[in-house]
Amino acid sequence: MKTNFKHFFNLLWGMTDKEFRVRYKNTLFGFLWIVINPLLQMFVIGFIFRFFIKDPIPNYYLYLLTGLLVWNFFSLSISKTTPLIVNERTLIKKAKFPKEVLPLSVILSNFIHLLIAFALLIIPVVYIGAFNISNILSLFEGLILLITFTIGFGMLTAALDVRFRDINFFVQAMLIIWFYATPIVYSINVVPYRLMWIWRINPMTSITQLLQNFFISAPGPGIGMLISNISIIFVISIVGIIVFKSESKNFDDWV
């Protein structure tokens, strides 16, 4: 058992390291793209949406940047993991290994990028005085929920895409809508109460709010929102892992 775990960990770390290094290979700016992309998004989206926000948000650009970093990690991870098993059909047919390593390596690599970006975000946040160390619990809660949900949902879509190839197209379309159903460019306070159920079934709501609370002291999620989102995260994560484990036995036949 110990040997199997060590083998799994070594394989996971090796593939994560490869994914991490290959991402910016032969690029001019290298790891700077970790912050360049979200910064460009922040300026463009912030410039446009500030004309439509009726309730001003303190430190809006940093509020927006925090949400974009969280969303970029999630959307990129799901976009890459969903078709991953199909795209890696040659490797799957040639070698026997735990298939879970494939989506986990992609997600872990992206998570490392996110942590680096967050470390850099601390600098301007501290400079403007928006940072409050007493909110550190929100950081750990947000990161744990984010990585848990991303793994569970990513494994679910990856497994389903092997059998139903429409899943990848559906996920790409859904992510566009999902972005606007997450409090990234706006505060959840502007959402009418009759529509609040949409945000209660969106796990990214509490995750985004928790991390915005840590970095710029924005209001965190209410207890009702948090319980609802955590429950959905738990269910989706468990279902995703079970479905992936069950379907992985047939990947060789389906791909």
Image: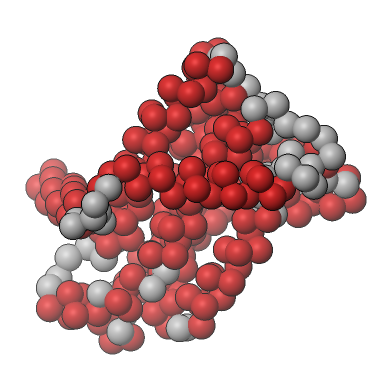
In which quarter of the view is residue 130 placed? Answer: top right
Point out residue 101 in the picture as x, y percentages from the top left corner.
Answer: 25, 58
Q: How many marks?
A: 0
Please indicate whether residue 16 sits to the left or right of residue 129 in the image. Answer: left
Point out residue 255 in the picture as x, y percentages from the top left corner.
Answer: 30, 84
Is residue 190 depicted above or below 27 in this figure? above
Q: Nearer the viewer, residue 146 or 21?
A: 21
Name which residue lies at 32% across and 42% down: 32
Please indicate whether residue 150 sits to the left or right of residue 207 in the image. Answer: left
Q: Nearer the viewer, residue 36 or 195?
A: 36
Is residue 60 depicted above or below 205 in this figure? above
Please indicate whether residue 33 sits to the left or right of residue 125 in the image. Answer: left
Please indicate whether residue 118 sits to the left or right of residue 180 in the image. Answer: left
Is residue 78 depicted above or below 187 in this figure? below
Is residue 116 depicted above or below 239 in this figure? above
Name which residue lies at 47% across and 68% down: 157
Residue with the most extreme left position = 3
Name which residue lies at 66% across and 45% down: 47
The colouring scheme, among rainbow, by chain, secondary structure or one colour, is: secondary structure
Q: Nearer the viewer, residue 102 or 62?
A: 62
Name which residue lies at 59% across and 50% down: 44
In which quarter of the view is residue 245 placed? Answer: bottom left
**Can see residue 203?**
no
**Can see residue 247?**
yes
